[in-house]
Image: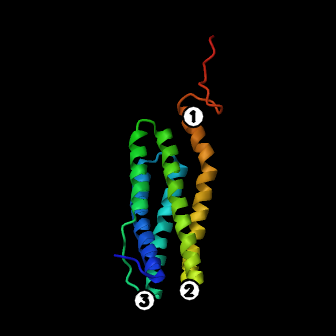
């Protein structure tokens, strides 16, 4: 469908992120099934619950704007999910490296969502849609919080992966000392 008005553009973007949240939820289920680190698993579980809330918030937004909640395929989300699936498969033989790959994939998801929600908030503000903006800001705040948690956890998870490979924090292989 050709987009001819700003309202149509905004609706398309809502439908796009609505689809993205659904795709990311499915991707998180796969991440959870493949993660081994308890902290990574906990983060994924928490964010899955938040994602379900984001979907409900988006449904409220559709309702507030007098629209039917529907999904427009989000090619960006599809690419990010596919990339995450590939990296989980490619790292499947070393759980610690797979956990680090899962965090990296999750970080990409968060930053995609953050960028999208920021744009939608700007549009809602310009249209005077205060209630819509409030729902979007709630989603954005949770996405930013999750992104920060991932960034704080990455050094620990990477250290575990390095240890599994017998590497020190400078990336050098640890040599055992002769007796």
Q: Secondary structure at mark 3?
A: loop
Tell me whether circle 1 and circle 2 mark residues in contact (CB < 8 Å).
Answer: no
Q: Nearer the viewer, mark 1 or mark 3?
A: 3
Whole-number angstrom distance, CA of label 1 to CA of label 3:
52 Å
Quarter of image, res 91:
top left
Circle 1 SS class: helix
Residue 66 is tagged as 3
Rendering coords of residue 94 (x, y %): 45, 36
Give how far across and how far down residue 125 sits, in percent: 60, 82
| Residue located 49% across and 72% down the image | 54
Q: Is residue 139 above or below residue 150?
A: below
Counting residues from the start of the chain, the first of labels 1 and 2 encountered is 2
Instruction: Quickly name the residue at label 2.
Output: 129
Q: Nearer the viewer, residue 174 or 12?
A: 12
Between 153 and 69, the one nearer to me in the picture? 69
- SS type, badge 2: loop
Alpha-carbon distance for marks 1 and 2? 49 Å
Residue at left 63%, top 30%? 168
Mark earlier in primary sequence (1, 3): 3
In the displayed structure, 11 sits above or below 111; it is below
Residue name at image x 60 percent, y 18 percent: 176
Q: Mark 2: few, some, or many residues within 10 Å (few <14, many ≥20)? A: some
Q: Residue furthest right?
A: 170
Residue labelled with disc 1: 162
x and y percentages locating residue 8 in the rendered image = 43, 80
Name the residue furthest top.
179
Q: CA distance from mark 2 to mark 3?
A: 12 Å
């Amino acid at each position: 469908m050709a987009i001819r008005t700003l309202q149509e553009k905004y609706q398309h973007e809502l439908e796009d992120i609505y689809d993205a949240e659904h795709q990311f939820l499915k991707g998180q289920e796969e991440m959870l099934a493949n993660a081994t680190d308890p902290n990574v698993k906990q983060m994924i579980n928490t964010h899955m619950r938040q994602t379900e809330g984001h979907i409900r918030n988006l449904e409220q937004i559709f309702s507030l704007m007098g629209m039917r909640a529907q999904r427009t395929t989000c090619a960006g989300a599809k690419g990010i999910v596919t990339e995450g699936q590939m990296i989980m498969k490619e790292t499947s033989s070393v759980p610690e490296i797979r956990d680090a790959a899962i965090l990296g994939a999750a970080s990409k998801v968060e930053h995609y969502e953050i960028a999208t929600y920021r744009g939608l908030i700007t549009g809602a503000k310009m249209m005077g849609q205060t209630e819509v903006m409030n729902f979007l800001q709630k989603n954005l705040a949770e996405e930013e919080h999750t992104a920060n948690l991932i960034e704080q956890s990455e050094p620990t998870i990477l250290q575990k992966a390095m240890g599994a490979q017998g590497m020190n924090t400078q990336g050098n292989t640890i040599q055992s000392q002769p007796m």
